[in-house]
């Protein structure tokens, strides 16, 4: 038995009929490398042989009576792989858009809490004889870092590795209500013992931020509830739409080197450029910069390989009001530096520590009330979107012998912010996964196809500046007459 942390449990409490708190990844696989050729059974057998190595895949939730404490994980005595591994055919012509349509439908359905909170779908019938593999896992079980740890157990470095012998799932005593109540009371006493040091650290952190903001030379980040409204900053529905984009990792590193910024700054600038272009085309670009929440891992030491969530967040202005791509990148780099400074001043683990005080019943009721009353439409957006960047392996991975050729990650959307952009580097590419509320951004593929265009604009400007042949800079101010050239992403 393992108790969920407050951060893990908060993803359960935040879940509503319209806000599904699972993460997902859409992989595309070349089956020509599979020994003996493709078969769905080979994928299922591969997972069956590795399932004992991935505890989040065999544990289910048990609620504490009267919600006296956060739920606990227990090994599911009735675990059945057939409930979790499924397959479906992709409509012709079997391109990325058709795959994205299926992924959106899968993402629109919440996970069954009576079973371990994950499922995978094998999508047959893609172009070039390839298959898709869509994995969906509840955020209560993993974050980006622990998801990468699952990849190390599920994937191989060659198509024909030494076979792993399956092991039976270890039986575990399912606690009684009495045991759960006793466990909850003990946890509550421990929590109360920690409150004074936590309050002291919080006060010190707030004072650090105040002093930093009073310092004329202090580096500051963005502030919640200062985001402008966009078409997707509204109450969301339960329907999802998914899109993908890809750019070159090597060329992205060239931009980083030419501009002397962080790689994550370049990624944020590419997303910002795509958002600016998309909103300009719709005539809805705000005069103020968009505001992104950027998750930050706070794992350390022995936590590096553990399941669950160890994350905090930064608020970063995306400088979408600046037309020139290099000036926009410089502004974003300064904004992330300020956000990091304030994040460190508050304390990297402050969010996870206070998460332990999330009252289950109150938190869940508040989330449903906020959603059902559409309160997100009645105040200024807390933020515009989430942008998460997860480093992936620079070498090929294999699943049941099939080579992964692309991996598009996707995170959840929230009430009032119906867009999530999650980014994963893999081999020589950077893959972008867009998760959007279908009713707020029905044309999310237009946003995805703006990514390579925005990157090309930034790359060309950065390389020209490095050669001291940069063209005349555009005005910093937003102009509604700005035009752009668009390209079609092949299906």
Image: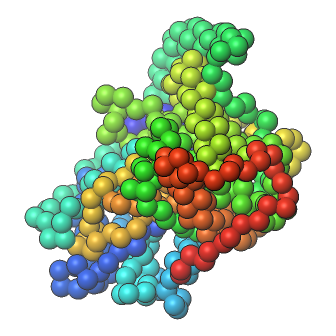
Q: Is residue 376 visible?
A: no
Residue 448 lies in what quarter of the image?
A: bottom right
Split into 4 quadrants, where in the image is the N terminus?
top left
Determine whether 3 is above or below 160 in the image. above
Farthest residue toward the right?
378
452 or 461: which is nearer to us?
A: 461
Residue 256, given in percent of the width and then of the height, sits at 46, 45
365 or 164: which is nearer to us?
A: 164
Determine whether 284 is above or below 385 in the image. below
Q: Residue at x 56, y 11 (%)?
A: 201
Lateral position of residue 350 relative to residue 15, left or right: left
Lateral position of residue 6 relative to residue 304, left or right: right
Residue 63, given in percent of the width and then of the height, sits at 53, 43
Residue 190, given in percent of the width and then of the height, sits at 48, 17
Q: Residue at x 27, y 63 (%)?
A: 396
Q: Is residue 297 visible?
A: yes
Residue 139, given in percent of the width and then of the height, sits at 51, 49
């Amino acid at each position: 038995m393992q108790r969920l942390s407050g951060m893990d449990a908060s993803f359960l409490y935040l879940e509503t009929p319209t806000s599904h708190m699972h993460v997902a990844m859409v992989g595309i696989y070349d089956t020509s490398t599979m020994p003996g050729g493709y078969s769905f059974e080979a994928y299922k057998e591969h997972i069956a042989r590795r399932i004992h190595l991935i505890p989040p895949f065999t544990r289910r939730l048990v609620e504490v009576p009267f919600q006296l404490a956060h739920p606990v994980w227990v090994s599911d005595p009735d675990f059945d792989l057939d409930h979790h591994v499924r397959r479906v055919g992709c409509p012709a012509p079997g391109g990325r858009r058709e795959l994205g349509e299926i992924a959106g439908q899968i993402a629109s359905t919440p996970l069954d809490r009576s079973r371990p909170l994950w499922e995978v779908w094998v999508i047959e019938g893609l172009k070039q004889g390839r298959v898709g593999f869509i994995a969906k896992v509840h955020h209560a079980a993993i974050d980006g870092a622990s998801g990468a740890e699952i990849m190390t157990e599920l994937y191989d470095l060659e198509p024909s590795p030494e076979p792993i012998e399956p092991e039976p799932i270890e039986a575990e005593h399912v606690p009684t209500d009495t045991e759960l109540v006793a466990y909850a009371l003990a946890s509550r006493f421990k929590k109360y013992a920690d409150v004074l040091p936590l309050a002291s650290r919080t006060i010190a952190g707030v004072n650090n931020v105040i002093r930093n903001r009073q310092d004329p030379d202090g580096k500051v980040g963005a502030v919640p509830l200062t985001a402008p409204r966009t078409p997707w900053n509204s109450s969301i529905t339960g329907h999802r739409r998914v899109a993908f984009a890809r750019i070159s990792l090597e060329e992205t590193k060239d931009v980083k080197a030419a501009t002397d910024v962080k790689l994550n700054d370049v990624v944020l600038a590419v997303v910002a450029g795509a958002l600016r272009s998309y909103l300009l085309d719709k005539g809805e670009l705000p005069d103020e910069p968009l505001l992104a929440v950027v998750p930050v891992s706070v794992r350390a030491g022995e936590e590096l390989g553990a399941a669950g969530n160890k994350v905090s967040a930064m608020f970063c202005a995306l400088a979408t009001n600046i037309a020139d791509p290099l000036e926009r990148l410089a502004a974003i780099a300064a904004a992330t530096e300020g956000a990091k400074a304030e994040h460190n001043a508050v304390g990297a683990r402050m969010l996870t520590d206070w998460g332990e005080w999330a009252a289950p019943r109150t938190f869940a009721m508040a989330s449903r009330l906020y959603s059902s009353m559409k309160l997100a439409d009645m105040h200024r957006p807390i933020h515009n979107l989430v942008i998460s960047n997860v480093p992936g392996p620079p070498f090929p991975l294999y699943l049941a012998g099939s080579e992964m050729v692309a991996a598009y990650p996707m995170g959840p959307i929230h009430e009032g912010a119906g867009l999530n952009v999650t980014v994963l580097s893999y081999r020589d590419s950077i893959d972008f996964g867009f998760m959007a509320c279908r009713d707020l951004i029905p044309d999310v593929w237009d946003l995805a196809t703006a990514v390579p265009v925005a990157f090309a604009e930034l790359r060309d400007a950065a390389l020209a500046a490095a050669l001291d042949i940069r063209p005349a800079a555009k005005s910093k101010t937003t102009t509604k007459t700005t035009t752009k050239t668009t390209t079609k992403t092949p299906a």
